[in-house]
Amino acid sequence: MLPKPARYFFEIYPLGPEGMAANYPTEVAAGQLINVWIGVSNHMGRIEYLLVHVKVGANATAIPDDRALTPSSATSRKQVECFLMDNQTQMFPVTLAISRPGINYNVMFELWYYNETAGGFRFPWYDGSVYRVAWSQIWINVTA
């Protein structure tokens, strides 16, 4: 009998202000603080050095592309770095504000990993068989 092949992956997910998958902010006043949490999990079979980019985009901003394996074109507003052991999950608070009113802002969370060979953080990552991207987002309307 052959053992089941290992599956390697990362997880990244937004959580509401209480650290739960509920009560996500959907509408805020311009300049009002937006408080959310980000959960990150490592299932790569080894310790990983990770970087989360927090980006804010508007309607025309490109989101990360799962097919072209490219990150969003939006500028990173915040960054969070951490080391995670295999099968470890960590949560991080994220606070930011959007100063211009508008509808359908997307707050994106991109997961980058440290590639020792390249000597820097990379997006996407390799799961042992194909390249993949790990990202998530929430949508927010900003009122005047």
Image (cartoon, rainbow, N blue to C red):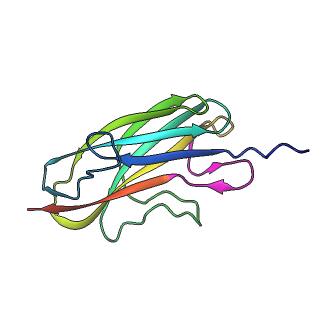
Residue 122 painted magenta: yes
**Identity of the residue drawn at 84% across and 42% down:** 3
Q: What is the x, y in percent for residue 138?
A: 33, 57
Residue 137 painted magenta: no
Q: Residue furthest front?
A: 1
- Decide: is 109 above or below 48: below
**Identity of the residue drawn at 30% across and 65% down:** 58
- Between 124 and 10, the one lying in front of the other is 10
Residue 133 vs residue 8: left or right? Answer: left
Q: What is the x, y in percent for residue 88?
A: 54, 31
Q: Residue furthest right?
A: 1
Q: Quadrant of residue 93?
A: top left
Residue 35 vs residue 136: left or right? Answer: left
**Identity of the residue drawn at 20% across and 53% down:** 98
**Identity of the residue drawn at 54% across and 30% down:** 84
Q: Residue furthest bottom?
A: 60
Quarter of the picture containing the C terminus is bottom left
Give the magenta part as a residue range.
Answer: 120-134
Q: What is the x, y in percent for residue 70?
A: 54, 59
- Decide: is 59 above or below 80: below
Q: What is the x, y in percent for residue 87?
A: 59, 33
Quarter of the picture containing the N terminus is top right
Q: Residue furthest left?
A: 144
- Between 99 and 83, the one lying in front of the other is 83
Q: How many marks?
A: 0
Residue 46 vs residue 27: left or right? Answer: right
